[in-house]
């Protein structure tokens, strides 16, 4: 069931992308609500898995893959329609490839969920901690939902946009760049622990030096 929720989230993502590239109508505002629903369902699949005792390594990896597909697709689309500079999705892509490769390979090797691999207090707080993970999801949801309004709102409701546009745009890009900062901050402990573990392996087994 939890994996079906993840899959349905990806199907909704396709609808969101399609709407972004359609001529602006009042239906364009649907993306605001769809994006919020997608991020709410991101927490729902984990809850269902725990409630139904369906947690598994595959489910954890599939959830991470679904998260990456969702956020990277939305960042790339946002850059393609000139809502964010191209370096924003590049940061997420590079960080995602490095960090998810480390976490997923270690998770498969050790047979545990990726977030359970963090050993340092800082890593457990920033990467695996429920509060920071929730904060990160909320910030990204706010960023994407705000971006979804940047095209239809001024075009279809110009008078109302004149009243709230500056505030809404400011908040949107505050969340965009906060997402970038959190993305980098949550990736650094994973890389640091990997490098530290790699050094320990080399010191214990000189034959591993390459």
Image: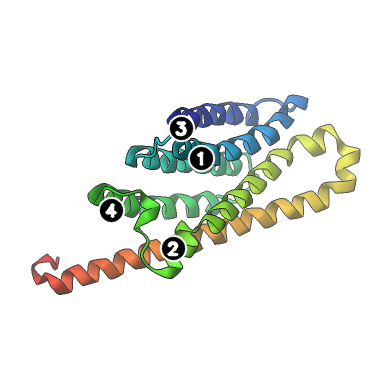
Q: Mark 2 highlights which residue?
A: 124
Q: Mark 3 highlights which residue?
A: 2
Query: Which residue is outermost to the left?
Result: 207
Give the residue at x 18% y 68%: 201
The residue lying toward the viewer, choosing from 56 and 29, is 56
Q: Mark 1 highlights which residue?
A: 47
Measured as percent of width and height from the top left, residue 77 is found at 57, 38
Characterize the local packing of mark 1: few (<14), some (14-19) or many (20 or more) Cα atoms within 10 angstroms: some
Q: Mark 4 highlights which residue?
A: 106
Q: Tell which circle, 3 or 4, labels the residue nearer the N-terminal end.
A: 3
Q: Tell which circle, 4 or 2, labels the residue nearer the N-terminal end.
A: 4
Image mark for residue 24? none
Measured as percent of width and height from the top left, residue 102 is found at 32, 54
Measured as percent of width and height from the top left, residue 144 is found at 64, 44
Q: Nearer the viewer, mark 4 or mark 2?
A: 2
Q: In which quarter of the image is the N terminus?
A: top left
């Amino acid at each position: 069931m939890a994996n079906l929720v993840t899959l349905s989230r990806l199907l909704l993502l396709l609808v969101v992308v399609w709407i972004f590239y359609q001529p602006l109508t009042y239906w364009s505002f649907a993306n605001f609500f769809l994006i919020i629903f997608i991020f709410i369902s991101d927490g729902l699949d984990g809850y269902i898995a725990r409630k139904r005792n369906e947690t598994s390594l595959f489910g954890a990896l599939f959830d991470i893959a679904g998260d990456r597909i969702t956020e990277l697709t939305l960042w790339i689309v946002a850059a393609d329609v000139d809502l964010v500079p191209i370096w924003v999705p590049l940061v997420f892509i590079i960080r995602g490839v490095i960090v998810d490769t480390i976490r997923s390979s270690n998770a498969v090797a050790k047979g545990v969920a990726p977030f359970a691999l963090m050993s340092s207090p800082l890593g457990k707080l920033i990467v695996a901690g429920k509060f920071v993970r929730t904060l990160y999801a909320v910030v990204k949801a706010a960023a994407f939902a705000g971006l979804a309004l940047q095209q239809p709102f001024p075009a279809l409701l110009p008078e109302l946009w004149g009243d709230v546009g500056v505030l809404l745009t400011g908040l949107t890009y505050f969340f965009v760049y906060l997402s970038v900062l959190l993305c980098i901050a949550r990736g650094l402990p994973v890389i640091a622990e990997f490098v530290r573990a790699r050094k320990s392996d080399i010191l214990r087994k000189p034959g591993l030096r390459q």
